[in-house]
Amino acid sequence: MHEMSIVEGIRSVIEDAGRAQGFERVTKVRLEIGRMSGVEIGALEFAFDVVMNGSIAEGAELEILNIPGKALCFDCEKTVEVEHRLDTCPNCGGARLLVQGGDEMRIKDLEVL
């Protein structure tokens, strides 16, 4: 389950930010996760509760913001939304797509005390 190591990285970032910015408690964590990132949301939510135990984010609410997949179609020259890397262009049916977004994962923001 690579989601556990992802959340361990998030915990490290949160604790570093707490030390640098002087906050002692995190009440909410917002993550942006692209549909094509390969992250299993259910596993990430489970891992979040386990890994944040004993940290400044223990009991924090986790909000996931889903980022749609985007790709540039070389056939119709349009940027389109896609669900998977191997999808065809929903506009023209072309198969020559270059992913432009939706594979990212980042901490959008934190609510802190």
Image (cartoon, rainbow, N blue to C red):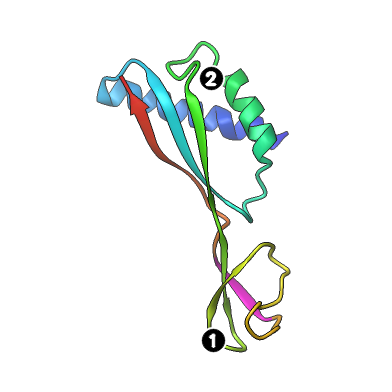
| Helix, strand or loop under label 2 | loop
Residue type, label 2:
Met
Where does residue 106 sit, x and y in percent of width and height?
Answer: 47, 44
Q: Residue furthest top?
A: 54
Question: Where residue 100 sits in the image (x, y, percent)?
Answer: 53, 68
Label 2 with label 1: CB-CB less than 8 Å: no
How many other residues sit within 10 Å of disc 1, few (<14), some (14-19) or many (≥20)? few
Residue appearing at x 62%, y 30% in the figure: 45
List the single residue furthest toward the bottom: 75
Rendered location of residue 93, percent (x, y): 70, 83
| Numbered tag placed on residue 77 in the rendering | 1
Q: Position of residue 64 (x, y in %)?
A: 53, 40
Whichever of labels 2 and 1 marks the residue nearer the N terminus, that label is: 2
Give above or below for 80 relative to 103: below
At numbered mark 1, what does the secondary structure look like: helix, strand or loop? Answer: loop
Corner quadrant of residue 80: bottom right
Distance, label 2 to label 1, CA atoms, is 44 Å
Q: Is residue 58 above or below residue 20?
A: above
Q: Return the residue nearer the eye: 43 or 9.
A: 43
Q: Main secondary structure of the magenta part?
A: strand
Quadrant where the N terminus sits is top right
Q: Is residue 108 left or right of residue 10?
A: left
Q: Amino acid at mark 1?
A: Glu
Q: Is residue 4 above or below residue 33?
A: above
- Region rendered in magenta: 96-100
Rendered-image quadrant of the C terminus: top left
Q: Which residue matches tag 2?
A: 52
Look at 59% across and 85% down and name the residue there: 74
Q: Residue at x 63, y 77 (%)?
A: 97
